[in-house]
Amino acid sequence: MNSTKTLLVLATLAASAVCARAAPAADAPDQNLRIRHYAMSIGKDGVQRESSHTDLMFRRAGMVWVEREIPSALREAHEHDAGHDAVHIGHAHADTTAAPLWVKRGDAGGKVQVNMVLRQQHKVIEVDEANYGNVGYGGSWANAYWVVDPARLEQMRAVGAASHGVQRYEAQQDGRTTRIDWDVAGQYPRKVERRDAHGTSLNLLTISSIAAPKTLPWRPLDDYERGDYSDLLD
Amino acid sequence: MNRTTIRKTGIAAAALICSLAGSAHAAGEAKNVIFFLGDGMGPVTVTAARIYKGEKQLIAQPGSLVSPERAALVMESLPYAARVKTFSLDGQTTDSAPSMAAYMTGVKMRNEVISMSSDTLAVDSAGKQFIKGEDTTCLPTNGRAADTLLELAKAQGRSVGAVSTTRVGHATPATTYAHICNRNGYNTIAEQSVPGHKNYNAKLLDGVDVLLGGGQRNYLPKSVNPSSKRSDDLNLVEAMKAKGYAYVDTGTKLKNLDPASTTKLLGLFSQSEMAYELDRVKQKLDEPSLADMTAKALAVLSKNDKGFFLMVEGGRIDHALHGTNAKRALEDTLAFDSAIQTGLDIMNKKDPGLKNTLVVITADHDHAIAFNGYPKIGNPILGQVNGYADGKPAKAADGLPYTTLVFGNGGRPNATAASQTNPEDGNKPWIAPARGPVRDDQSAMATDDDNFLQEVGINLGAPGAETHGGGDVMLFAGGAGAKLFKGTMENIKVFGKVKEAAGL
């Protein structure tokens, strides 16, 4: 980390000791994260439904890369399929299911660039605003970069003091409780939980730090072709 | 009877039959043809757009309608209607290439083929497309060109044009003036429109008189346009200007163009597709609306006393539907309807009663959008279903509400996080309920937000993956020769009817 970042982190730690609020820095610390998504609901039909998936997120200054972590069972099946002809979706020819999302922002307050990476086609798709939702970018840089916009934490109630570098926040709205365990130094949430009062609905993000990959996934992209979203449509 | 008498009787009988036939058929009445195409604009999209229009009308003039369902789209004002079957040669569900080509040529061809013979292949035996980048690799032995209505009109000395909100080389407009085995050869399609280029479509004679839409990146080389997709350094815009084309690239320039002194017009307003109408308006982009483009095209083309053929496409209704973004689809449908109003207004002035003008409005194919539930009359079309009996939100098996408009299939997104964004940087949040076994509670969501993406039945996972639908589409016709359009017909039959009505 450079000295500016160090100062920012120290300032944040100091601030957190006093008022336990995370000051959103222009650049958060680099992170390599495994994000486990879990959703559960019990319907009025008595059926309990669950869904889970895992993403890998790599955050560096001014950019964040999110890609699906493919379960090992599926990885083996993928390898088998790769030898066959490419999957046609209707007549659009790219299989872009769970293609990595690469969101960049030059300077703080600079324009956000959203890209989708098609590894098989060796193509980087530049996505314009009208198509953000369709590639899974919600329109908020802060939510992509920090997973939870730190500004949102300021609207929540801090529960006790930070413990082992983690500050808990809580908020209630419409019968739902949201709890966020915020890693103050790392500037990401260790856990985001949203549950209703009756236990019939639960959304849970569990985030852990992982080792950086040997090859950062955006390195091989320099020689990839550039395309735009209209390349995916008929 | 001697031979002369027999012959005279025969001729008289034939003349009688012909005159009787002339009252049932309408051969050659329409020297002018406007063919309006709403890409992917199937029956549910039309109905939903009508209700959406009604809601806007009631806001502007409260009490002017009993309920929004009673509104009327301009396209409905045409007196003749038909249903059209849209299957292609190899697809139960078609894409825009063979489906529009069916209308333009009367030939049934494979998916992705642009105005060629039925034996034409779009991909090789290994399934690889006949393209390299955006250049064609179609072999000269792979099929033959099929004559289009636009070419037939040009051969009669009429003026011809194609207008779209997509790239001018996109499938729908391309089928009017180009011939290629694979629609993705955008550079080659562009070259076919340029008089003097070695790939020029000679059947266009002195050139398409009006070509308006997007697609700068296939006409301008990298040296002047870093976003160019061209593999050479040819400037097709300059080439066309050298052949007498006026060139415009903004809405303002199109507005200021004097049609009286314009014989040939090329307008390219974006790199690839033009903006959705919703964004064009909200972001105040300097792009013409489809109505603006229609008006200017008609001003130029109608100067020809011999008549004209104009194709106008609302090209991005399809794209919004692919993205399961119903609001943008409905806004583009209303923009398409506005263009129809503009066209009718202009032609009713120039040709009162449309005595010499045929107007056809149709779609190339349907989509997977569904109008579901039992919503109460007057229920907001982009809202959740509030039941007609009690006005309360209808709930699915899981106890959660659902919207009236949903899609049978569609793609990403799947994470709930996308629906919890806070607006930032002036970007509006994308509200995308989770797609999976666990549904989100949409009770508190603004399902009528610009950026709301409806739920889907079959999650296909990939962005923009919502598919076309195989259902029949509707066709509306008015003006000269319109009476030919009735009943249920295969899409290839539309060609013959336009040809007959227009005397081509």
Image (tube, coloured by chain):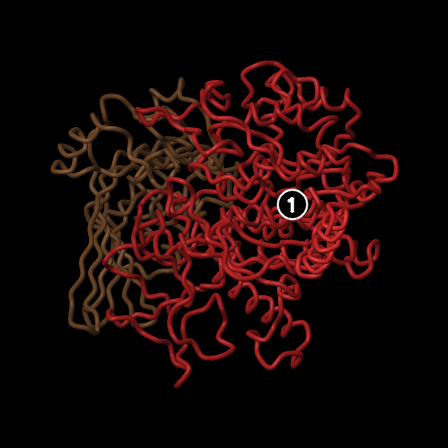
Chain colours: A brown, B red
Q: Secondary structure at mark 1?
A: helix
Query: Label 1 sits on what residue type?
Result: Lys
Q: Position of residue B331 (x, y in %)?
A: 57, 57
Residue furthest out toward the bottom: B389
Q: Quadrant of residue B174?
A: top right
Q: Quadrant of residue A25?
A: top left
Quadrant location of the C terminus of chain B in the rendered image: top right
Q: Position of residue B370 (x, y in %)?
A: 40, 62
Q: Which residue is mark 1?
A: B499
| Number of dots carrying numbers | 1
Q: Is residue B443 visible?
A: yes
- The chain carrying label 1 is B
Q: Position of residue B465 (x, y in %)?
A: 38, 45
Q: Is residue A183 left or right of residue B350?
A: left
Packing grade of label 1 (10 A; few <14, some 14-19, many >=20) is: many
Residue at screen point 22% across, 61% down: A202
